[in-house]
Image (cartoon, grey):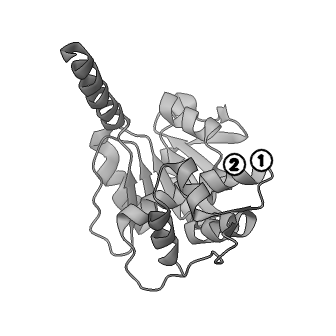
Amino acid sequence: MSKNGSISASVIKRLPRYYRFLGELKKQGVERISSRELSERMKLTASQIRQDLNCFGGFGQQGYGYHVDSLHNEIGKILGVDRNFETILIGAGNLGKAIALHINFETRGCHLTGIFDVNPKLTGQRVGDIAIMHTDEIEKFCHEHSPVVAVLCIPKANTQEIADKLVSLGVKAFWNFSHYDLSIDYEGIIVENVHLGDSLLTLTYGANIVISENEDN
């Protein structure tokens, strides 16, 4: 898949953006694009794009550029969007329900098959096509369906305990919204901590700089 076993985190972080931009180009009917044209659209340098893609073998042809459909498919394979990983979601509060309803898991390599919550009043309620189950049923469900990915939308205090249990049940990857920086001491476990508040603070930092500069002028 790659020329070496060590791809930098910054390159990996850019791959979904390449995938998204190329998908938009496909919808627009664009068949091929040069690294220069892609760089102008993505506000990256052409050399950066070439370096990133060369980490995975390179996909362009000199004088032709990149075939949009082929490159989109190849990056999708690198990202695992064709794997259809069995996925469960823990925590059916407002955030959990919003993620279940509005994230298109199937186009991102995941198949959401189970939603769980500790609140018995939610048991049996439906989120889209999926009926919420009580968290007491997680173990039985995991034995039957072998989920690989777990989305955590639970209170911070409960995160490590539930993560430890899920790892013991075979879960290999966590999309974690719990405000707890989940670091699991298990080999081969992948964690993506999502802090929406941190993202907003990054935005307000930028807004503060811009407004301060305008006030100084």
Quadrant of the image occupied by residue 204: top left
| Mark 2 Cα-neighbour bin, 10 Å: few <14, some 14–19, many ≥20 | some
Give the residue pinned by disc 2. 24
Residue 95 lies, with reference to residue 68, above or below; the image says: above
Give the residue pinned by disc 1. 28
The one nearer the camera, 204 or 135, is 204
Give residue 35's position: percent from left, percent from top: 58, 63
| Mark 1 Cα-neighbour bin, 10 Å: few <14, some 14–19, many ≥20 | few
Furthest residue in direction left, as rendered: 216
Q: Residue flagged by tag 1: what amino acid is it?
A: Gln
Give residue 36's position: percent from left, percent from top: 56, 60
Please indicate whether residue 20 sits to the left or right of residue 215 in the image. Answer: right
Q: Residue flagged by tag 2: what amino acid is it?
A: Glu
Q: Secondary structure at mark 2?
A: helix
Quadrant of the image occupied by residue 64: bottom right
Residue drawn at the location 44% of the way across and 40% of the way down: 153
Compute the Cα span from label 1 to label 2: 6 Å
Q: Is residue 172 visible?
A: no
The one nearer the camera, 25 or 77, is 25
Give residue 149's position: percent from left, percent from top: 52, 60
Whether pointer 1 and pointer 2 mark residues with C-beta atoms closer than 8 Å, the reply is: yes
Please indicate whether residue 193 sits to the left or right of residue 149 in the image. Answer: left
